[in-house]
C-alpha cells in the first residue's frame, strides 16, 4: 500500500468544505468561476450549480475544442484555490514546458495537445498537472534545476512530499492522479532504451513516484533502485510523522536542509555523482498535434495496476470504473466546452445579418503557418515601439554622434522621440486564387503581423475573403474584442485561396462590422486586380469620408507585376499604397507595422 493513501479518507464527503483554502476574493473570480459554487469539497473537485447530465459520449468529443483563454480562466481559479494564493498566474507554453516560479508565483504548463487521449482525457491530465504545480507553489521552498543529479533527485523527493501534503487536503485527487499516471505511461521512456546512470536515475524516478517501472532492470542496478526507493519512502514517512506532531506546520529553512541531506544519501545509495549532468530523458510524445488516443482496454489495464499498487483496501472494480469515467470532472469539462463555443462567436452574435462567416473546422493544425523565427524577428524589431521611445538624429539633443560630426552631416545629435501607437486597425486578407501558389508564406506573414500587433497591445481585427461557387465569402479571422491566440491562426489556416477579387462587394459586406469597430486604419492586402475598379474606388472614398485611413498593399508575382499592381491601387483612391513581391512576403509584417508609428 502506498504511504500517501488513507482508506478512511478515500470516501468523498458530500457537503464538507475546506476552511482557509476554500475562501477566495470575489474580485479575483473569473467569468467561468462564477458558474462554479463558492464552496469546494475536500475531494479536490469544485461543486457546480449545473445538474449532471450523464457520461460524456466518445463521439461528441471528436469535434470538441477548448480555447486557451477559457482554459486559463478556469485554471487560474482552480490554482488559486489549490495553492491558497490569490496572486498565482498560469501560462501556456507551446514548447511543452512545465515549470513553477515560486518568486513570481507563476505556473507554466504545456497546451492540451501535449497529452495523449481524447480531449476529455487530455484535460484531465492537464488539470492534474496543474494541481501538482499549484500544490508545489503552496508548499515548496526551493526548486532546483533538473539538469544535474542533485537537482533531479531533490525534485523527485519534493514532488512526493508535496503530493502527500496536497492529498491530505484534497483527498479525491488520488483518482485523478491514478488516471494521470495511467495515461502518462505512454510518455515514460522504456528503461531498456537507456544506459548507465541515466537508466538508474529514470528507474528510481518511475519506481519511487508510481510504484512500478517501464522495462527491465537487472542485478546491482535493480537492487540499488529498490534500496533507494525504500529509503526515500522511509524519509517521506518520517517527514509526515513530524509534520503531524508539529500540528501540520513546517519550517521552510529546516525542511530544505533536511531534504538536501536526505537527497545526498539517496545519491550515495544509487552510486551516482551528484554533479553529473542529466541529459533530457526522451519522451514518447504524439507525432502530431492531434495526439494519440489510447484503447480503452489499455487505460483500464493501467488503472487496475495502479489501483492495486495504491490501495488494497478498496474495491478494485468500483474504483477502476470511477477513475475511468471521471464523473467529478465531467460537469467542469462541459462548462469549459460551452464557454469555448460561446467565446468563439464573441463580438459577432449576429453574423448572419452581416453576411460574414466564422471558420468552424477547429480540428485543423495551424503549426504550418506559425513561423517562430519570423515572429521573433518581428518582435525584436518592435522593442523600441514597445518601450514607446526611439532614438533619432536631430539638429539638437543631449548626445552627439561622432561619426556624423566627422562626416559633416547636418544632424549630429541623438535625441529620444516619443512613439505613439494608440490606434485601432482592421486588416483584410485577399485569399483569391492568385494567392494559391504562395498560400503558406502569405499566411505565415499574416500570423507574424498579428503576433506583432498583439505584442504592442494594439487593438485589431482580421478578416479574409474568397469566392466559392461564384458566391462571395467574408471570413472573421479575429474579432476586435478578443486577444489574439492560436485559435485565430487555426481559422486562417482553414480558409483556402479560391475565386476572384470582388473587393467592392467585400467592402460593402464588412461595412457594418467596420463601422461598429471604428478603426483608425483599414489595411487591405490584395493582388490589386479587383473585379470592378470603379466600384472599389467609390467604396474606398466612402470609408475615407467616415474618418478611416485606407491603405492598400499590393502583392505581385515579381517586381514588374508589383509595379503594375501599385499603379492600379493608386487609381483606387487609397490614401497610401505599398507594393510587395510575393517572393518578399517575409517583409510584409515590417511594412505594415511601419505604417502605425506616429510621432
Image: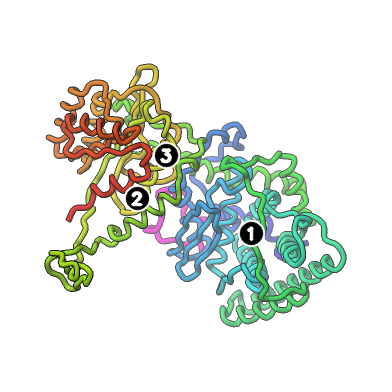
Whole-number angstrom distance, CA of label 1 to CA of label 3? 51 Å
Q: Earlier in the sequence, mark 1 or mark 2?
A: 1
Q: What residue did someone put label 1 on? A: 171
Mark 1, other Cα within 10 Å: few <14 / some 14–19 / many ≥20: many
Q: Is residue 36 magenta?
A: yes
Identify which residue, 53 or 394, lies in the foreground.
Answer: 394
Q: Are marks 1 and 3 in contact (CB under 8 Å)?
A: no
Horizontal and vertical percent position of residue 558: 34, 34
Horizontal and vertical percent position of residue 461: 31, 41
Q: Earlier in the sequence, mark 1 or mark 3?
A: 1
Q: Which residues are magenta?
A: 18-41
Identify which residue, 119 or 225, lies in the foreground.
Answer: 225
Q: What residue did someone put label 2 on? A: 452
With respect to residue 458, does 475 lie above or below? above
With respect to residue 473, does 391 lie above or below? below
User: Which picture quadrant has residue 445?
Assistant: top left
Image-based side of 596 in relation to 466, left or right: left
Mark 2, other Cα within 10 Å: few <14 / some 14–19 / many ≥20: many
Horizontal and vertical percent position of residue 158: 63, 69
Tell me the residue at 87%/65% (across/down): 219
Tell me the residue at 37%/44% (across/down): 586
Amino acid at each position: 500500500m502506498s504511504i500517501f493513501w488513507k482508506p478512511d479518507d478515500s470516501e468523498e464527503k458530500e457537503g464538507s468544505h475546506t476552511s482557509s483554502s476554500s475562501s477566495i476574493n470575489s474580485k479575483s473570480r473569473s467569468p467561468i468561476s462564477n458558474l462554479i459554487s463558492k464552496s469546494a469539497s475536500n475531494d479536490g473537485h469544485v461543486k457546480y450549480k449545473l445538474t449532471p447530465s450523464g457520461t460524456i459520449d466518445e463521439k461528441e468529443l471528436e469535434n470538441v475544442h477548448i480555447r486557451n483563454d477559457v482554459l486559463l480562466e478556469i485554471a487560474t481559479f482552480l490554482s488559486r484555490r489549490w495553492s491558497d494564493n490569490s496572486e498565482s498566474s498560469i501560462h501556456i507554453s507551446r514548447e511543452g514546458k512545465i515549470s513553477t516560479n515560486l518568486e513570481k508565483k507563476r505556473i507554466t504548463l504545456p497546451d492540451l495537445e501535449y497529452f495523449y487521449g481524447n480531449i476529455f482525457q487530455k484535460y484531465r491530465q492537464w488539470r492534474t498537472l496543474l494541481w501538482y504545480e499549484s500544490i508545489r507553489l503552496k508548499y515548496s521552498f526551493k526548486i532546483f534545476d533538473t539538469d544535474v543529479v542533485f537537482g533531479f533527485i531533490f525534485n523527485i523527493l519534493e514532488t512526493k512530499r508535496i503530493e502527500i501534503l496536497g492529498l491530505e487536503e484534497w483527498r479525491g485527487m488520488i483518482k485523478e492522479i491514478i488516471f494521470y499516471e495511467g495515461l502518462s505511461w505512454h510518455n515514460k521512456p522504456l528503461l531498456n532504451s537507456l544506459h548507465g546512470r541515466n537508466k538508474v536515475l529514470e528507474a528510481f524516478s518511475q519506481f519511487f513516484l508510481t510504484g512500478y517501472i517501464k522495462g527491465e532492470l537487472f542485478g546491482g542496478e535493480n537492487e540499488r533502485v529498490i534500496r533507494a526507493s525504500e529509503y526515500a519512502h522511509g524519509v517521506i514517512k518520517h517527514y509526515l510523522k513530524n509534520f503531524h506532531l508539529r500540528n501540520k506546520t513546517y519550517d521552510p529553512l529546516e525542511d530544505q536542509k533536511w531534504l538536501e541531506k536526505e537527497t545526498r544519501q539517496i545519491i550515495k545509495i544509487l552510486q551516482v555523482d551528484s554533479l553529473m549532468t542529466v541529459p533530457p530523458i526522451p519522451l514518447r510524445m504524439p507525432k502530431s498535434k492531434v495526439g494519440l488516443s489510447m484503447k480503452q482496454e489499455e487505460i483500464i489495464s493501467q488503472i487496475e495496476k495502479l489501483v492495486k499498487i495504491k490501495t488494497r483496501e478498496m474495491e478494485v472494480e468500483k474504483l477502476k470504473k470511477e477513475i475511468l469515467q471521471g464523473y467529478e470532472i465531467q460537469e467542469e469539462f462541459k462548462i469549459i466546452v460551452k464557454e469555448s463555443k460561446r467565446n468563439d462567436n464573441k463580438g459577432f452574435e449576429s453574423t448572419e445579418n452581416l453576411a460574414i462567416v466564422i471558420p468552424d473546422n477547429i480540428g485543423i493544425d495551424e503549426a504550418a503557418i506559425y513561423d517562430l523565427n519570423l515572429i521573433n524577428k518581428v518582435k525584436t524589431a518592435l522593442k523600441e515601439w514597445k518601450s514607446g521611445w526611439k532614438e533619432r538624429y536631430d539638429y539638437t539633443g543631449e548626445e552627439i554622434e561622432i561619426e556624423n560630426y566627422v562626416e559633416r552631416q547636418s544632424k549630429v545629435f541623438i535625441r529620444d522621440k516619443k512613439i505613439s501607437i494608440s490606434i485601432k486597425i482592421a486588416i483584410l486578407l485577399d485569399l483569391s486564387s492568385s494567392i494559391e501558389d504562395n498560400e503558406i508564406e502569405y499566411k505565415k506573414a499574416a500570423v507574424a503581423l498579428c503576433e506583432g500587433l498583439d505584442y504592442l497591445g494594439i487593438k485589431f481585427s482580421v478578416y479574409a475573403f474568397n469566392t466559392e461557387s461564384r458566391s462571395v465569402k467574408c471570413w472573421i479571422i479575429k474579432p476586435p474584442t478578443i486577444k489574439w491566440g492560436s485559435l485565430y491562426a487555426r481559422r486562417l489556416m482553414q480558409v483556402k485561396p479560391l475565386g476572384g477579387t470582388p473587393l467592392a462587394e467585400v467592402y460593402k459586406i464588412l461595412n457594418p462590422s467596420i463601422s461598429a469597430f471604428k478603426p483608425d486604419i483599414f489595411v487591405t492586402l490584395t493582388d490589386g486586380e479587383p473585379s470592378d475598379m470603379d466600384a472599389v474606388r467609390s467604396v474606398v472614398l466612402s470609408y475615407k469620408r467616415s474618418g478611416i485611413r485606407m491603405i492598400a498593399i499590393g502583392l505581385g508575382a515579381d517586381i514588374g507585376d508589383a509595379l503594375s499592381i501599385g499603379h492600379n491601387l493608386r487609381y483606387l483612391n487609397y490614401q497610401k499604397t505599398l507594393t510587395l513581391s510575393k517572393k518578399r512576403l517575409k517583409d510584409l509584417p515590417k511594412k505594415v507595422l511601419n505604417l502605425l508609428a506616429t510621432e
